[in-house]
Amino acid sequence: MKKMIFKSALAAMLLLGGNTLMAGEAKAPVMHKAPKLKPLTPEAEKAAYALFDALKMKEGIHNALMQSLAIQIKRQPAMAPYKDIYEKFFTKYTNWDDMKKDLAKLYAQAFTPAEMKELTKFYRSKVGQKSLTILPRLTQLSMLLAQQRIAKHAEELKKAVAARAKELEKDAAKAGN
């Protein structure tokens, strides 16, 4: 039972980006904070929302989170019984109506209203729409290629991790004396 709870907690940490465990340390790891953003002008907000519509960002964010969850569950089967909890949690805290203004501020830091209008024009074009369809698949295939290259050398990684685990065990044993 304890092992299952540990695996579930570990799976949650991995999913939420906390992939480093800080054994023996009482304080939580430092989380990166979102940048402070300048106020959003009405023109920039309107341009950002049009761009988000052209990018189909509302659906894209939701789909990306659900795909990420599916991948993590495949990698960490101990998470499977909690899938519905993760889905509800993500849906609750990534609600589009709650996020879109903050995202608009973020985009307004990177692009002028005129640039966002140009991007919107592009993404509403035939080539822009095609890129929205094809680029995610190309990104996925790129990641697959990288995974395959890494998998060829997995044994090297396993040996390095095992060696480090032995070092940590020795250090813990010395500290316990």
Image (cartoon, rainbow, N blue to C red):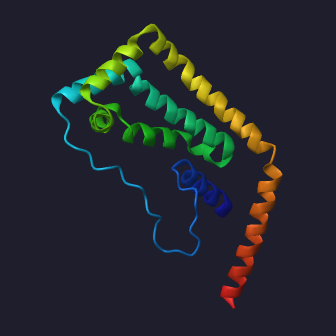
In this picture, residue 144 sits left or right of residue 32: right
Q: Residue furthest left?
A: 42
In this picture, residue 70 sits left or right of residue 59: right
Expressed as whole percent of the image width and height from the top left, the position of residue 34 reads 35, 49
Q: Is residue 23 above or below residue 129?
A: below
Q: Residue furthest bottom?
A: 177
Expressed as whole percent of the image width and height from the top left, the position of residue 61 reads 44, 31
In this picture, residue 177 sits left or right of residue 158: left
Total count of labels: 0
Expressed as whole percent of the image width and height from the top left, the position of residue 132 reads 49, 19
Residue beneath the point at 64% across and 56% down: 7
Q: Nearer the viewer, residue 31 or 5?
A: 31
Q: Residue furthest top?
A: 126
Q: Nearer the viewer, residue 168 or 94?
A: 168
Q: Is residue 66 above or below residue 86?
A: above
The quadrant the C terminus occupies is bottom right
Q: Would residue 49 be seen by someone viewing this image from the given angle?
A: no
Q: Quadrant of residue 31?
A: bottom left
Q: Nearer the viewer, residue 127 or 166?
A: 127
Residue beneath the point at 18% across and 26% down: 43
Residue beneath the point at 55% across and 25% down: 136
Q: Would residue 162 be seen by someone viewing this image from the given angle?
A: yes
The quadrant the N terminus occupies is bottom right
Expressed as whole percent of the image width and height from the top left, the position of residue 21 reads 58, 64
Q: Quadrant of residue 125?
A: top left
Residue beneath the point at 31% across and 24% down: 116
Q: Quadrant of residue 30?
A: bottom left
